[in-house]
Amino acid sequence: MYLEIEAALHRFTAAEDGAVSVEYVVLTAAIIGLSLAFVGHVRNGSEAIAEVIEEAVEETDMAGMCPSGCAEAGGGGGSGTQEAPPP
């Protein structure tokens, strides 16, 4: 009986069938966790940059950049054609 237990214990410690599955599950969970953390950081950073850009656009004075007729058309650029500058 002692030899049977010793042989079964030896087979159990030598077997590597389940180890590959466990390693796969652990590595997959680590990759998913790191990906979620990365996405969270990128999202926070892109939201901050978008707010800075939005503030800069809102503060920009567009009156001097618009061709004539732009203000009358509600800021949409009028008919979309620009007048040629005088010679």
Image (cartoon, rainbow, N blue to C red):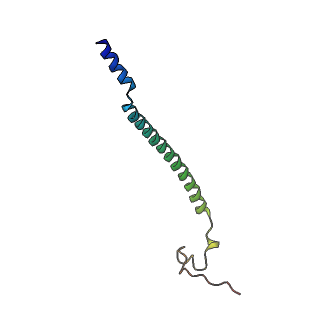
Q: Nearer the viewer, residue 63 or 6?
A: 6
Q: Where's the C terminus, which quadrant?
A: bottom right
In the displayed structure, 5 sits above or below 84; it is: above
Looking at the rendered structure, the number of numbered marks drawn on it comes to 0
In the image, 49 versus 69, the foreground residue is 49
Q: Which residue is at a point 58% across and 80% down the rendered structure image?
A: 69
Residue at 39 percent of width and 23 percent of height: 13
User: Would you place residue 60 above or below residue 16 in this image?
Assistant: below
Above or below: residue 55 compared with residue 12: below
Q: In this orientation, which residue lies closer to the viewer: 58 or 18?
A: 18
Residue at image point 61% right, 79% down: 68
Q: Most extreme residue toward the left, as rendered?
A: 1
Residue 20 location (% of width, % of height): 40, 35
- Quadrant of the snapshot with the N terminus: top left
| Foreground pick, 45 / 38 | 38
**Outermost residue toward the top in this view:** 2
Q: In this image, 26 relative to 76: left or right?
A: left
Residue located 54% across and 79% down the image:
78
How far across and how far down the image is residue 19, in percent?
40, 31
Farthest right residue? 87
Q: In which quarter of the image is residue 15?
A: top left
Task: Name the quadrant containing residue 18.
Answer: top left
- Compared across the picture, whether 85 is left or right of 11 comes to right
Question: Looking at the picture, how far across and down is residue 72, in whole percent?
Answer: 55, 78
